[in-house]
Image: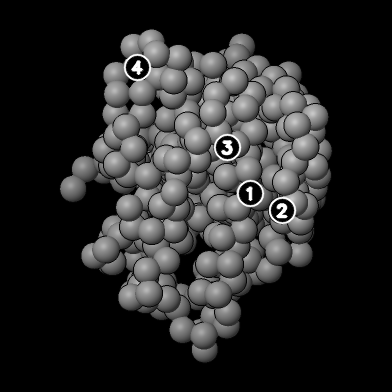
Amino acid sequence: MSIPVVDFGAYSLSEGDVTDEQLHKLSKELRTAFTEVGFVFLQNTGITQEEVDRVMGVSKEFFLQPDELKQPFSRRSFANNLNHGWVSLETERLNPRRPGDLKEAFNTASLHPDIKWPSSDAVPGFQGIQTCFFQRCKELSLRVLRVMAHSLGLDPEVFLSTHQLIGTDENGTTLRSLYYPPVNSEKAKEGQLRCGEHSDYGSITLLFQSSEGLQVRRRSGEFICAPSIPGAVLINIADLMQRWTSDHFVSVLHRVLLPPAGDSNTRQSMAFFVQPDDAALITCCDGSNKYPPVTAGDYLIERFNDSYGRS
């Protein structure tokens, strides 16, 4: 198994609408990828490598500051959205059975005008670049969700109508800037990883990575390395979408291992975690009762309790 590569040029952000013939072709390719692998690389999406480099650059400037300058922007500091903000090293355990992940993150989870951002003196352009990239990812996500609904023979509104509040505090969609600092493998705790094995929580995830390092689990149980393809977006199915489609689309485990001993390279990625609106009730779209109904907001809180610890 390798991760399929699909040309999304026909429905790129720089194009208008897609023809029926093009939609049919894309639907078939995405359906195959998401039922057999759970991951797909999309090329020619309209999001350029220059855009990705810009948001990674400003993110790295933020992460390279001393912790005391990042502290005022810590996750759980913002009353209107507790998931927004900086996540320090080893705070999150995506596999709760392992020690804290050796990564930092900045979660852009709220675009509320009252949210406090790093000053333009400290990190020039941080807010504007992050929020602009958030909106670009949102636009692409909605196009992907439309193709996915078509691939299952569903009305596109099945997914689109439940993702109307992306960017508000009534929807958990989050752009995560992820930074993996150099690791001294000898000092790492037993079982510690840069990012523990996990599946994502919501509908789909868009991932942009600066280098290799991500591993994806095959159905046989072994992990394979996901390549880094410049200009491509790696998209995967998340847990609520698997429930929604009664296991038709598969949400698979993935992880980031420690680098080899002596490798002092850093790693960066940008992940856009697409969530249905908090109040959306997720039920199996084939009418079965394979999974009990759950609201997207409740499911997300439960998963955060696992990865950050219950508080």
The kind of residue tagged 2 is Leu
Marks 2 and 3, Cα distance to the nearest angstrom? Answer: 14 Å
Q: Which of marks 1 and 3 is nearer the N terminus?
A: 1
State the residue at coordinates (18%, 48%). Answer: 311
Residue identifier under label 4: 291
Instruction: Classify mark 3: helix, strand or loop.
Output: helix
Q: In the picture provided, is 279 more to the left or to the right than 57? A: left
Q: In the image, residue 310 lies at what x, y percent?
A: 21, 43
Marks 2 and 4, Cα distance to the nearest angstrom? Answer: 34 Å
Residue identifier under label 1: 140
Nearer to us in this view, 98 or 83: 83
| Label 3 neighbour load within 10 Å: few <14, some 14-19, many 20+ | some
The kind of residue tagged 4 is Tyr
Residue 6 visible in the displayed image: no
Q: In the image, residue 5 lies at what x, y percent?
A: 78, 33
Q: Earlier in the sequence, mark 3 or mark 4?
A: 3
Question: Marks 3 and 2: in contact by CB < 8 Å?
Answer: no
Residue 137 visible in the displayed image: yes
Marks 3 and 4, Cα distance to the nearest angstrom? Answer: 21 Å
| Label 1 neighbour load within 10 Å: few <14, some 14-19, many 20+ | some
Q: Which of marks 2 and 1 is nearer the N terminus?
A: 2
Question: Marks 1 and 2: in contact by CB < 8 Å?
Answer: yes
Residue identifier under label 3: 145
Q: Name the mark on residue 13.
A: 2
**Which one is in front in this view, the residue at disc 2 or the one at disc 4?**
2
Place residue 32 in its image quadrant: top right
